[in-house]
């Protein structure tokens, strides 16, 4: 793949909020991350981070009786891959997110975003009540 062209490529996947589609999102991380120049370990870290972000959508964005979708955009550039995970669910006050200290998991989880931050080089969360959420995750090649 031509690395100059790579920076203009965007791969978009839209999946229902059902766990059986998580594997497709993970496979695309590898399919897009390797040509961007990420190592096997970096791709694996990003697969886990993206899985956690999508699982958060499945667990929190939509009411149990409301079907929803997740839009995943893969934006490769030479030496890095940025993945956006976006929903149109209930949203939340992003400025009230906990700090980067490890949370105490409760009955509803609580480690998802912490793991995303630990495994990625940068994470941006955009959300507001009633307007959905977009999590932008970037992993860069190291070494």
Image (spheres, helix red, strand yellow):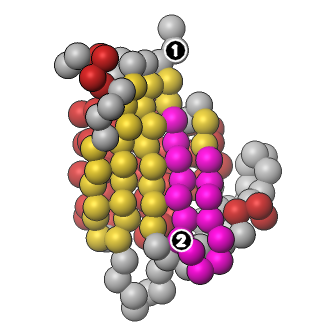
89 with respect to 105 (left or right): left
Secondary structure character of the magenta stretch overall: strand
Reply yes or no: does residue 132 show up in magenta: yes
The residue tagged 2 is 132
Asked whether, in this view, residue 37 is left or right of residue 21, the answer is right
- Report the residue marked by disc 1: 142
The residue positioned 75% from the left and 45% from the top of the image is 100
Is 56 colored magenta in this rendering? no
Direction left: furthest residue: 1
Packing grade of label 1 (10 A; few <14, some 14-19, many >=20) is few
**Label number found at residue 42:** none
Counting residues from the start of the chain, the first of labels 2 and 1 encountered is 2
Figure disc tally: 2
Front-lying residue, 5 or 31: 5
Q: Which residue is rendered at x = 52% and y = 14% of the image?
A: 142
Residue 34 visible to the viewer? no
SS at mark 1?
A: loop
The residue that appears at 53% across and 71% down in the rendered structure is 132
Q: Quadrant of the N terminus?
A: top left
Left or right of residue 25: residue 112: right
Residue 59 at x, y percent in the picture: 49, 72
Q: Which residues are magenta?
A: 124-138
Task: Work out whether residue 88 or residue 21 is closer to the camera in this orientation and state it.
Answer: 88
Locate residue 110 relative to residue 74 in the image: left or right: right
Residue 12 visible to an observer of this rendering: yes
């Amino acid at each position: 793949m031509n690395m100059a062209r790579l920076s203009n490529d965007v791969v978009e996947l839209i999946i229902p909020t059902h766990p059986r589609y998580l594997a497709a999102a993970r496979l695309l991380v590898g399919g897009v991350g390797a040509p961007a120049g990420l190592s096997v370990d970096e791709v694996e870290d990003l697969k886990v981070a993206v899985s956690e972000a999508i699982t958060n959508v499945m667990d929190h964005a939509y009411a149990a009786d409301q079907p929803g979708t997740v839009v995943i955009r893969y934006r490769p550039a030479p030496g890095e891959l940025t993945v956006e995970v976006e929903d149109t669910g209930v949203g939340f006050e992003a400025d009230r997110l906990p700090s980067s200290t490890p949370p105490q998991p409760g009955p509803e989880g609580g480690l998802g975003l912490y793991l995303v931050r630990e495994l990625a080089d940068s994470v941006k969360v955009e959300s507001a009540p009633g307007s959905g959420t977009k999590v932008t995750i970037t992993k860069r090649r190291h070494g």
